[in-house]
């Protein structure tokens, strides 16, 4: 049986062939896609909030125009 700790530190349990990281009794590997997706959504939202799409669009227009010889 897995011993649960009161702190939020991940516990590394060694099995016969690989290391499995447990966090509050659940494997992190199981929830990793969800954690990465939520992190990506938060980063995209932060970029939109700070006005990055306009800056990216302006740079793309400059590169495209210089590529075809107009800008």
Image (cartoon, grey):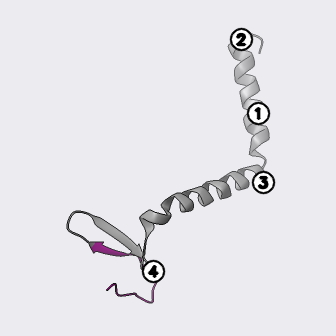
Foreground label between 1 and 4:
4
Residues at marks 1 and 2 touching, judged by CB atoms closer than 8 Å? no
Q: Which residue is mark 1?
A: 57
Q: Disc number at residue 25?
A: none
Q: Disc number at residue 24?
A: 4
Distance from Cα at disc 3 to Cα at disc 1: 15 Å
Looking at this view, name the residue that lies furthest to the left.
16
Q: Earlier in the sequence, mark 3 or mark 4?
A: 4
**What residue is rendered at 74% in x and 24% in y?**
62
Residue 50 x/y as whole percent: 76, 52
Instruction: Indicate the quadrant where residue 11 lies.
Output: bottom left
Residue 25 shown in magenta: no
Mark 4 residue element: loop
- Image quarter where the C terminus lies is top right
Foreground label between 3 and 4:
4
Q: Which residues are magenta?
A: 1-13
**What residue is rendered at 29% in x and 74% in y?**
13
Q: Which residue is mark 3?
A: 49
Main SS category, magenta section = loop
Residue 8 shown in magenta: yes
Distance from Cα at disc 1 to Cα at disc 4: 44 Å
Tell whether 6 sits left or right of 11: right
Q: Disc number at residue 68?
A: 2
Nearest the viewer among 21 and 30 is 30
Residue 34 x/y as whole percent: 56, 61
**What residue is rendered at 45% in x and 90% in y?**
6
């Amino acid at each position: 049986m897995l011993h649960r700790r009161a702190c939020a530190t991940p516990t590394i349990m060694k099995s016969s062939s690989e290391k499995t990281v447990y966090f509050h009794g659940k494997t992190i590997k199981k929830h990793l896609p969800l954690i990465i997706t939520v992190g990506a959504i938060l980063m995209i939202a932060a970029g939109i909030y700070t006005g990055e799409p306009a800056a990216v669009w302006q740079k793309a227009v400059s590169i495209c125009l210089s590529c075809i010889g107009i800008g």
